[in-house]
Image (cartoon, rainbow, N blue to C red):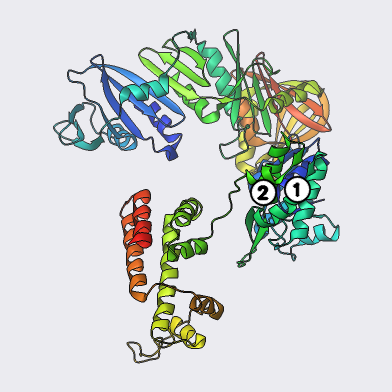
Amino acid sequence: MSRIYIGSKIAAIDSVKKEFPDRILVLSDNPEIQSKNYSVFFDSNKIFLYDNPNIEKLKIIQSQINANKGTHFLFYDDDSFDGRNSLIQSVKKTNQIFDYSYPLFGDFAGLRRSINSYINTTNKSIDANCYEWLNKNCPTVKVKSKATGSKKESICYDIDLLNKEFEKILSINQKITTSDLENSSFVTDADIFEFIEYVMNNNVEESFILTDKLIDSIGEQALLLILLSQLIFILEVVGCKENKIFSIDKIVEILEKRDLLGINFDENWKETKYTVKSQNPIRVKIEMSKSRHNSEKISLMICNVIDSISHLRNNGRVEQSIFLLLNKLLFV
Amino acid sequence: MSKLDKMKISMNENKTTGSDSLLFYVKDDLLNIYLNNGQSSVNFGMNISVEEGKSFAVDANLFYNAFSNFPTDEVQFAYLEADHSLVFGNKKTRVSLRTSLVPNIDDLMFNSFNISSEVNFNKLNYSNFTDALKLTSFSCAPDIDEHPYTSILMFIDKNEFNCCSSDKHRISIYGKKYTNQNSHLLPKSSADLLLSFVNKNDEFDFTIYKNKFFLKWNQNIFTTALESNSYQNVFENYNKFFSESNQVLSTKVDKQQLLQSIKFIGNISSSHTITMHFEADQLIITGSSADKGTVVDKIQLEEEVESLEVVYLANHLLKVIEMLPHDYVTLNVKEYNGFYLLMVETLSYNHIVFPMS
């Protein structure tokens, strides 16, 4: 009998360990190796928990279950697993799905429930003011859908991190108060678009803080390329504003290069084939509402970013190149 | 050349570390060679006197390939410091390899071979050490498999090595059984390296200091990292197959006859498994595959045994029988939870082959 756990991996592991205290939990992301090495003499007491297995891996897990080789549980970050798979269908039929999903950002009732359920297990208490404080300051985590082709991403409250913080506070106190929580500095995911806004608004401190976080999470090349792409987008919108083009449809047309694509024949005097890279009008509308530098300054910013990319690709040092670039973008 | 061969093994063990430089340096007017692969380090004192002490490093793989394939036996070396190159060869053939500068040799030596002066080295019992490693390293799991099955558990009692290992399909125990003694885990790759260094002719001293195994002989020193054993339960569990199993049959078989039979069956049937059928005073070994057919071979036993049929992995059986030095092998079949385990036992060595379920 298999199971599916969704949401917080830490909560899922805790739950399995509590329910099966005599068994050994093995976390795995490679069922192929697991199935090859399975031994009835060594592994029958183990529970294998697979991290976001795809269809190919599910097939191997299914064959292991059919051959009665061990206990196999599945873990998914969210509920975007393929419900057509026979193993998942059988788990659904037997109602063996255990949901430990993080509460969605803004779901205060869910956040409150999660906090209470943790506090109840400790026999300690939390001050009522803490809920309000956490509504505003609770750490968040981005949960990316692992389903093929899906770009779905949800912002959720990071209950695992919060519980760890509670655990630390409760190890010395009997009650959690807002002053305890105010001492915590939660590390949350850095948002590159937030960073770009800070750069455009010359917010020096936040720009430098976010740069470090973003280099750690996505790397300097991705950071610069996304910044470059966003600057080019801003340049085109600013250019439209300067040329007194305010119609969103017209701007979208310009951004999609509809005025340029397909106007010339190819070398055989036939119409060229092209695909339009569609632009989101809402994104354009938001950009139009913002106050930006003039196109000349944005062009200079683009040149600086390109110089930095080129410098880094010629064995330049990250700490020097990014530091210089930010100084140029923010101060010059 | 033999030292280079050993170094080659040392290099290949961990290609990803990037520590692939062969260091030549001079100490007390004598040439030394040093190599490190991230897990193990070796320093060879070459007994070659050098007048002017310059240190340099060359790409170990390049040097090995160039030197081992050199067409003649007579080779002369010259290090050209100004050109950053090591030239070697003779009038007919010449090789020039780029060299690089060596960081502080003393730091390297300290990091690799630092050992407290209070630590005593013990004399290595060659046959005990090689038997312990040889008879257990083959039954470790490959590096990519589950830890700690990729390592040998090793403990030393009265200067004797005791080892055990398993890949979950077989168990090897050399010497005493593990019952929570002070122990270390030795990765299979390091065990194979160690075996390549020791030989009968030289006198070796060893010690374990700060989770490192040190081996000293002549002017040479080798060290390899050990892992702390935090898997006591896993290794202690091996004993239950001996203590909780019931003897079903025991018989003596001619080693060569058994080997030939298994190899012959394996070659014809191309099957990974063989079926061993004990019946009266005969051992009937069969192998079959759906597309190639079936092979049967009989071995006459010295006495009648209980009838039973069980399937084992042919390779695992072959390997252990080949390893044993005796002319006759005692096969014991023991029953454990309804499974027939094949045990090959000698005075200081116990091996279990698990059946295919």
Measure the alpha-carbon separation of dots 1 and 2.
10 Å
Q: Residue at x 51, y 87 (%)?
A: A249
Number of callouts:
2
Residue B332: % across, % down: 75, 23
Residue type, mark 1 in image: His
Pick the quarter of the image with the N terminus of chain B.
Answer: top left
Instruction: Name the residue that disc number 2 marks.
Output: A31
Q: Nearer the viewer, residue B265 or B57?
A: B57
Give residue B10's quadrant in the image: top left
Disc 1 sits on a residue from what chain?
A
Instruction: Name the residue that disc number 1 marks.
Output: A72
Disc 2 sits on a residue from what chain?
A
Residue B81: % across, % down: 17, 31
Give residue B19's quadrant in the image: top left
> Could you tell me if residue B261 is visible in this image?
no
Give residue B110's quadrant in the image: top left
State the SS at label 2.
Answer: helix
Q: Few, some or many C-alpha atoms within 10 Å of disc 2 (few <14, some 14-19, many ≥20)? A: many
Q: Few, some or many C-alpha atoms within 10 Å of disc 1 (few <14, some 14-19, many ≥20)? A: many
Residue type, mark 2 in image: Pro
